[in-house]
Amino acid sequence: MCYEFDALPPIPAIAGAAVDSEDLVLTSDDGTQFAAFVARAEEPGGAGIVVLPDVRGLFRFYEELALRFAENGISAVTIDYFGRTAGVSKRDAEFEYMEHVRQTKADQIADDVAAAVAYLRTPEGGACRSVFTVGFCFGGSNSWLQAANEHDLAGAIGFYGRPGPSFADGSPGPADRAREMTAPILGLMGGADQGIPQSDVDMYRDALEKAGVEHEIVVYDGAPHSFFDRKQEEFAEQSADAWQRVLEFIRRNS
């Protein structure tokens, strides 16, 4: 698992920033309805972002993250993965998410992301001209994969995603699909992540280089998996640097 149920992003709210937010239900290409949360920038800069959670799916951490993006002029939609198996209701800390994770499929998540991208491009979603994805752990891998899924993205950002296959259906991972990617990649990794060795990070970087994909892969020495967390106070400097890199990546590619 990536984050505990009570985790929060290590990003201070911008005092005085006005943000409009609400729960959504979006509809995927196969007719599935799934839960989402939108935060709209009061003064949008033309960029929007789809937030892909960790294995828990949609919960407060990612709603708060969407708000922080909107405060910076970036309209954000956070999506849930489990509309097909768990419906669209709110969930508590006891939600047995792994049984639902095992039923996810890469192509279905891609369709859900497409619905979120389309929403961000509507007037209601902010009329975003440049759309990005960002994800964490399971969502990090999924975010990178969206660069290969014909969403016309401006960029894909992943925090400690696995470069190799991570789906129960055995579908290929980001490194295997590097040659299909049509958007720049930002990777933010923990150097002490026991689940993602440096050899995997090097393999992913090499695959992107060979495919000619513009990319930046940053490894924070000594940082564990899930370091981007308000509770991880000893990694506050790394988290602040990662957040600034995310914002700069969006500005540079918008």
Image (spheres, rainbow, N blue to C red):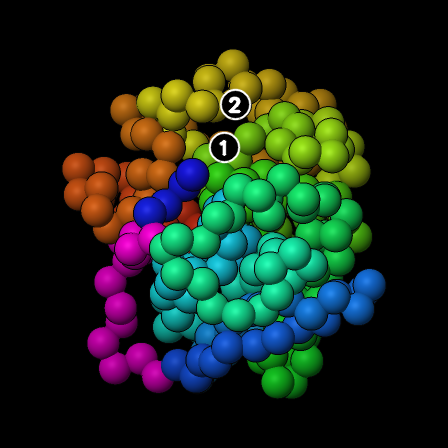
Q: Amino acid at mark 1?
A: Ile
Instruction: Please state the total of marks drawn on the protein image.
Output: 2
Q: Position of residue 129 (x, y in %)?
A: 65, 71
Q: Residue 230: x, y in percent?
A: 24, 50
**Residue position marked by numbered label 2 in the rendering:** 201
Residue 242 shows in this picture: no
Q: CA distance from mark 1 to mark 2?
A: 8 Å
Q: Residues within 10 Å of mark 2 (few under 14, many from 20)?
A: many
Q: Is residue 103 left or right of residue 195?
A: right
Which image quadrant is residue 206 in? top right
Residue 169, given in percent of the width and then of the height, sits at: 74, 34
Q: Work out which residue is located at the far left of the displayed protein and give it.
A: 234
Residue at x 53%, y 70% (from the top left corner):
89
Is residue 14 on the magenta stretch? yes
Residue 35 among those drawn in magenta? no
Residue at position x 69%, y 70% in the image = 33
Q: Quadrant of the C terminus?
A: bottom right
Classify 195 as above or below 187: above
183 left or right, relative to 91: right
Q: Residue furthest right?
A: 30
Tag 1 residue: 217
Quarter where residue 8 is shown: bottom left
Magenta stretch: dominant secondary structure: loop
Q: Position of residue 18 (x, y in %)?
A: 35, 84
Query: Which numbered disc flags the more N-terminal residue, 1 or 2?
Result: 2
Q: Which residues are magenta?
A: 5-18
What is the three-letter code of the residue carrying label 2?
Val
